[in-house]
Every structure is written in structure tokens, then in C-alpha cells.
Image: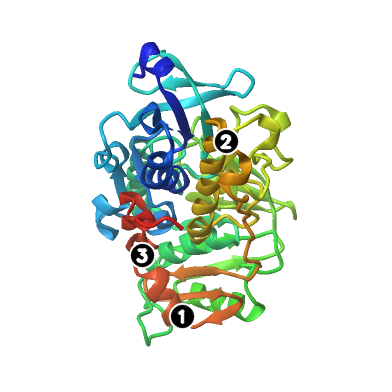
Amino acid sequence: MVSESTVQSQRNIVILGGSYGGISTAHYLLRHVIPALPDRDSFRIILISASSQALCRQACPRALLSDNMFPQDKLFVNIPELFNQYPKGSFHFVHGTVTKLDTENRTVSISLKTQVDMTEKVEFHGVVIATGASTLSPLLGLNHDETILRKNWTTFRKALPNAKNIVVCGGGPSGIETAGELGEFLNGPTGWFKSKSPSRKVAITVITASSRILPALPTSGARKAEKFLADVGVTVMKNTRVTHVAPVEPGTDGVDSKVALTVDSGDTINADLYIPATGTKPNTDFIQKSLLTTDGRVHCSRTFRVDEAGSRVYAIGDVASCVKQPALHVLFKAIPILCANMKQDLLIADGEQRASTGEDRVFIEDNHVNQLVPIGKNKGVGAAMGYQLPSFLVWLVKGRDYWLWTTGPLWSGKQWAKES
């Protein structure tokens, strides 16, 4: 818990969210921004997260099947331990859920996880909103904390052996990856040079309202993906929208529940297991509506400042409106821009003249198609910088371990060893 006396004697830079954006921002500030401030000992980074563990969310489509899919110490990492490398007192972790961001009084209200029915209010000198987004399925993201996610995975895994009909709703990357992993796991792998799996033990169906899956990719890539899915027993229903989901047995609504799906044609589809994968919802319920866009993200400029919220308020990652296609690789470019502008604002707040702090840095998004979609452990489709990639390269870059090879430097801060 952060004591009242400590809060008042420190200038707190509060980071809301303990995933890629929040952890990366904390590392960068501690390495390059705070040390450059005139009164650096008066600053402290406070990171608030509903989970004490960070997760490589992109790996969920495969990780949900078994703990044997990935080394668990790489899939999950302990957030407080990542920051033991910094001077004592420069960083503080709060395990809790943000309930209100008060930009007028410059405070953050927190419901603490460690103490039941305990709330805390922290004043901020600057705040970074990096709360990310929640997935519709509790299997595909850290919507609460690692304990709840693991419990959902365990429940789902116990139901898998008895499932004969599985429906995945959503033709985007998450839906296709999940269906591909399920198909390979339950119906058998295709192998590098073998086209079709040995048998189709479980019927797996992808339902999408679009005329094709993976609409961001070229049509040829989408067709190839559909073939790879078919090879592991996955059928795709296009131009079909799910209008209602009801549990077959009253009183059941868990990840292992049998459901009846009503689609827009009026037909009913029964599923032993159902996974909705039709996008994400920004975690911004604690923010006043006037600061949000119509899709629930935080309205910010390309400097990552939330200008309408007052001075030294920023947004990064999935919640930032200035990023049209949030993705892990975008952070490599976004974090240095955000932190450079924060450094400038903090220096100005300490009396520096604007002319001496340099110009604002502005985020310019790459509009090329950059999307990699593994389908099982051996196949995949994708494009980078607008160019379609062969299946082997999709496997090499992402399909082997769903980006786990990239997360170590991000979690540890080594990714931000040099100021850029």
C-alpha cells in the first residue's frame, strides 16, 4: 500500500496497466527520463495493475490447450520482480484495479487486490493510461488476473476430450489462430510436407460475418488460410452473423458450457464448446466519457498526450486513439515518442523554457499490412510491409512460439537499453 505521507512527498508518475505498454513505459522512464530531470530523486514511478503477472497475450490461442505448449516462466512473468534492478524507492507496484481517473483533482482511485474492500487514492504529477483491452472470451486474454485465466484454461481443458462440435466466432487473427490450434490439437497435425491431417475427430467451425476470413490480408492469403484450416478439420461459415447465444442447460454460462447459437438466417447451431473471438473492448470504464472516442478508446494526439485531460496525461497501446492498428511491433516505435514528449513536459513543469526542451515528437503510423497468422505449429499466412509472406516465414517469426522470443527484452527492459 502507498502511504499518504509518501504520496504527498513524492511526485508520482502513475502508469495504469501492467502489460506491454505500461511495463515498457516504466522501464524507459526509469532508464532515460527520470535520471535526466533536475530533481530526479523526487520522482517515483507507480505502476498499477489488476494482475501481478504479465502475459504474452498473443500466445493464448495455443497456451489455452496445455501448460506444456510453452515454458510457463516465459509465458507469465512477475511484474514487481522486473523492477528490482532500479534504485530503491524509484518504483512502486500496486496490485489493484483502477476505479476512477480524476483529471481535475489529478488523482487515481484504486480498488486494492491485496486487501478486501480496501480502496486507495493516489495523486499524480503525470499519468499514462496503458490499460489495454479485454477479449470477449475469458480464454484469450488477461481480463482479470492470472489466477482467473488459469482457472478458465483448466475448466476448458477438462471439457475438450468430450467435445464433438466446437464453434469459434470471428474471422480475424485471434479466431483463425484459435481454430487452427484446436484443429491441430484435436484432429492431428499436417506436418511440413503433408497436406491433410489423418482424421477429423472433432467438428470445428469458424463463423464470420464477413465475406472472407482475415480481411486485412490479400484474398490469396485468406484462401490459403482457409485451406490450411480445412486440412486440420476446420470449416468456415462466411456471411453469417451470430445474433444470440444461449446455454443449452439452464444456469450454465462458463467456458465449458454447451450453447445454442442463433444466426441471422434464423438457423440454430449447437456447440459443445464456444469461443467468441470477435475483437476486444478497451479497458476505459474508469475514464470520463468526454475523454473517449465513440469506440471507447482514449482521445489522444499523435504525441500521445490527452490534451483535453490537462497537463501530463498520456495514453499508449490499445487504448490510444492515435494508433489505428494496435500491435506489439508498433510499441517499438511508440514508446520512445511518448517518453520523449513526457520528458519535455516534465522539464517544462520544472521551469525549463520550451525552446530548450526540443520539439515534440509525433507518431506516424505505418499503413502497410503487417499481420502474421499461424495456423497450427507448422503453417501460417501473413504479410509484412505490404508483401505476402510464405508459410515458412510466418512460422519462423511468429508460429514457433507466438512472439515469446521477443518478450524477454521487453519485460526486462533490455529492449530500452538505449534512448531513441
Q: Is residue 69 above or below residue 126?
A: below
Report the residue at 43% width, 37% height from top.
37
Please state the horizontal and vertical placement of residue 88, each as a whole percent of the image. Answer: 25, 31
Q: Earlier in the sequence, mark 3 or mark 1?
A: 3
Please state the horizontal and vertical placement of residue 142, each as a whole percent of the image. Answer: 43, 42
- Point out the frontmost of discs 2 and 1: 2
- Point out the frontmost of discs 3 and 1: 1
Viewer-proximal residue among 57 and 177: 57
Q: Earlier in the sequence, mark 3 or mark 2?
A: 3
**Mark 2 lies on residue:** 348
* Inter-mark Cα distance, 3 to 2: 56 Å
What's the residue type where badge 3 is placed? Answer: Phe
**Mark 3 lies on residue:** 185
What's the residue type where badge 2 is placed? Answer: Ile
Viewer-proximal residue among 179 and 405: 405
| Residue 358 visible to the viewer | yes
- Point out the frontmost of discs 3 and 2: 2
- Quadrant including the N terminus: top left
Residue at disc 3, secondary structure: helix
**Mark 1 lies on residue:** 391
Q: Earlier in the sequence, mark 2 or mark 1?
A: 2
Residue at disc 2, secondary structure: helix
* Inter-mark Cα distance, 3 to 1: 19 Å
Report the residue at 41% width, 39% height from top.
34
Residue at disc 1, secondary structure: helix
Please state the horizontal and vertical placement of residue 203, each as a whole percent of the image. Answer: 48, 63
What's the residue type where badge 1 is placed? Answer: Ser
Viewer-proximal residue among 160 and 395: 395
